[in-house]
Amino acid sequence: MTTTIGIPILLGLLLLPIYTVIAGFLFGKPRDFRTAGIGLGVMAVMAVFMIGSTAMMGIAFGLITPF
Amino acid sequence: MSTTNNTILTPLKTLSVKFLALVVVLGIAALVMLEAIVHQLQHGLAVTDLASWGTQEGVTWGIYIGTFEWFAGMAVGALAAVGYIRYNELTRYDIIARIGELWALIAGLSAAYLIVIDLGRPDRVLNILTAWFVTVQYSPLAWDVTFVTALLVMTSTMLILSLRRDFSEMNLNKLPVYTALIGELLTLGFRPEEREKLDSMLRWLGLALLILAFTGGMVPGWLLGVVGAQAGWYGGIAGIAFLSAGLLSGVAVLAITAGVLRYLYGMEEALPEEVFVGLGKALTLFGFVYLVVQFNNLLPSIFPMAPLAESQVGEAMLYGHFATDFWLAMAAVAIPMLILVLFRERMLAGGVGLAVVSVVMLWGVWVKSQLTVIEPLMYSSGLPYEVGTYVPTLVEWVITIGAILVAILLFSIATKLVPMGRLLDDTASTEEVRN
């Protein structure tokens, strides 16, 4: 059972705000796909930046820690 | 758009000796913390008082995780406030939303930072990332990593898009050169007809932040609540307990910041009394809810039918080893809450009174966060071990207090880089400039 609870929590709960933003930006009035695209682009870039910088930090610490 | 709030730019345009002194002092604190981190990296978690549960009679999580819970809660509370303000377009509270965006981001980063510190070997953060696709199927820790990442991504998106709108309404030539550069970057490709859509998008983002706060915002509580073998942690109220603490500490940090900004920069127009009355009402409500949840959390453990390990944890908290800390923490929330109920209008006049009671409440929540994480670990459930001990070492104190001081440093610097809100009275003239 424990291995099945994570996916509903991820897709049904944790990602709910992301769905809200995507739907709201694209289909909320006034319709303006350019501005919506800029907003979603900012969010995508920040996601890549947050995950990427965490990975880079892990790699950097791996290089400087002598064990 | 006739409201005057020119003072919103005052922090940007002034640079006093006192401010520079503050930055220097906090900068020195950051360097001392850095030295402690290097020390911990060289010698490992042996420099802390953390030890295995059971035979080593220690605790596995200490003030790093306790303070993580406090920072994560603060981020949740701050983003809930931002979401509420942006979704309902509460123009009067615009400056509170900006303060909240900055604090949610800084508190979220501080929480993530303390988790990395607690790993002992920070390079193991790569394991968290590479194993995520498997662990997210069953591990609350993986859900927590997902939640904190979502929090940081959505808060930074809110900050960037709201700044894009605010900068588009300002004459960048009147701002300090570094702020103007940030403004130029964030308004790249801006078109005036974009503004209405940006308003709508900020509302949607506000709704999403509210959803995130009240759903994902419970996850750090589940880290404790799902551990069936640990008395004092296990139970269905852990997520709600975390959320109630977060709402209180998040709003408290906004109230402190607003009070300090108003006092230091004379921002009476930008931060009118009604804003502090609103924040005071929110603090009163969240303080009350926090105490009710704490009562519900503790009652089963001190009732005569409680399992032995549960009653040991509850009794140590209420009457035993931790009673002083516990009751001081509860008093630090309850007394300010009663003061707010009884004297709200009078003491809120300048914002300073609200800032003072908020500091006390924030301290109370911090102490209780430590007790929530650490105290149950000292009591083994159903095993014949001695009661564990934990006394944070100097390294732990330096890193933990350093994290708090660095957060204050980051916010202080941010007040000199970005406007604290939307400039309301200058719209017509700046629209001409932008067009």
Image (spheres, coloured by chain):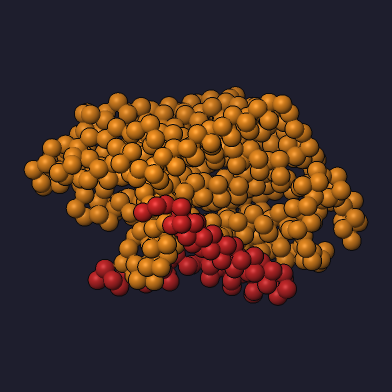
**Rendered residue at 34%/45% (across/down):** B44
Q: Nearer the viewer, residue B364 or B127?
A: B127
Q: Quadrant of residue B397?
A: top left
Horizontal side of A63 relative to A50 (left or right) equals left
**Rendered residue at 42%/62% (across/down):** B126
Horizontal side of B72 relative to B237 (left or right) equals right
Vertical placement of A52 versus B270: above or below?
A: below
x and y, in percent, of residue B424 in the image: 79, 47
x and y, in percent, of residue B338 in the image: 45, 28
Q: Going by the picture, which residue comes out furthest to the front?
A: A66
x and y, in percent, of residue B73 in the image: 45, 47
**Rendered residue at 21%/49% (across/down):** B230
Placement of the C terminus of chain B among the 4 image quadrants: bottom right
Q: Is residue B73 visible?
A: no
Q: Nearer the viewer, residue B385 or B120?
A: B120
**Rendered residue at 18%/42% (across/down):** B56
The mark tally for this picture is 0
Image colour for chain A is red
Q: Going by the picture, which residue comes out furthest to the left?
A: B384
x and y, in percent, of residue B136 in the image: 37, 67
Q: Quadrant of residue B392?
A: top left
Q: Quadrant of residue B244?
A: top left
Vertical placement of B208 versus B321: above or below?
A: below
The orange chain is B
Q: Is residue B171 visible?
A: yes
Q: Nearer the viewer, residue B91 or B53?
A: B53
Vertical placement of B159 versus B39: above or below?
A: below
Horizontal side of B273 relative to B179 (left or right) equals left
